[in-house]
Image (tube, rainbow, N blue to C red):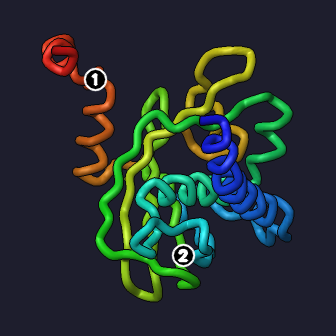
Amino acid sequence: MASTERARRPFPAIVNVNHLIRLLRLLLRPRGPIISPLLPCRTHFRVGPTDLDILGHVNNGKYFSLMDLARVDLIGRAGLLPHLRRRGWVPVVVAETIQLRRSLSLFQAFVIHTRVLGWDDKAFVLDQHFERGHEVIASAIIRTRFVSRRGGTVPPREVLGLLDLPGESPALPPYPARWNGDQESWQGPGPVLQRQTAA
């Protein structure tokens, strides 16, 4: 058993290193002009070997990791990173949903478009979608909030204030608005389903 565990460790390590290299490239590259988080942020990627599943396509779970990186890119290009570091505020995802329409294969170039759609008194709602050329590969909606390392949630209006942006949210499109509203009311499968699963 011990030898089997040792044999499994290198591949996850390679995947993590690849993710770290991508993150460092985003953080260390020249930023260019500041962009508004309310406008699309384009983050360019290319499919690597560690992104693939056994069928040779990008693994479903990898889409979420790539979206994490694209949101970091948006935060950096919006000029938020220095403010967040000084205050000890960090973004955390509290809900996300994705629709996969096409597949991505090895070495294909693609772009993730990231944009803040709106917010409520606790969290931001973002749209992220993957494009290969003019073809949409996947679309996602993300609910993310900022938390303080000292504890507690940072209201979106305080985050927006760092960029001198107004605190009033644009109107969310119908589906993201319904989805976002459902996140507050849905608390998991509930005791009935949990008992059925346990049985």
Please indicate whether residue 115 sits to the left or right of residue 34 in the image.
left
- Locate residue 33: give its quadrant: bottom right
Res. 75 in view: no
- In percent of the image, x 17 and y 12: which residue is there? 195
Res. 42 in view: yes
**Marks 1/2: CA–CA distance:** 33 Å
Residue wearing tag 2:
111
- In the depicted structure, whether residue 147 falls above or below residue 14: above
Quadrant placement of the C terminus = top left
Foreground pick, 48 / 154:
48
Q: What amino acid is at disc 2?
A: Val
- Locate residue 177: give its quadrant: top left
Q: What amino acid is at disc 1?
A: Gly
Label 1 vs label 2, nearer the camera: 1
Residue 157: x and y in percent read: 58, 33
Q: Earlier in the sequence, mark 1 or mark 2?
A: 2
- In the depicted structure, whether residue 121 falls above or below residue 54: above
Foreground pick, 135 / 9:
9
- In the depicted structure, whether residue 101 falls above or below residue 199: below
Residue 3: x and y in percent read: 67, 42
- Locate residue 5: give its quadrant: top right
Residue wearing tag 1:
188
Q: Residues within 10 Å of mark 2 (few under 14, many from 20)?
A: many
Q: Which structural element holds mark 2?
A: strand
- In percent of the image, x 46 and y 27: which residue is there? 121
Quadrant placement of the N terminus = top right
Please indicate whether residue 163 sits to the left or right of residue 71 in the image.
right
Residue 73: x and y in percent read: 68, 59
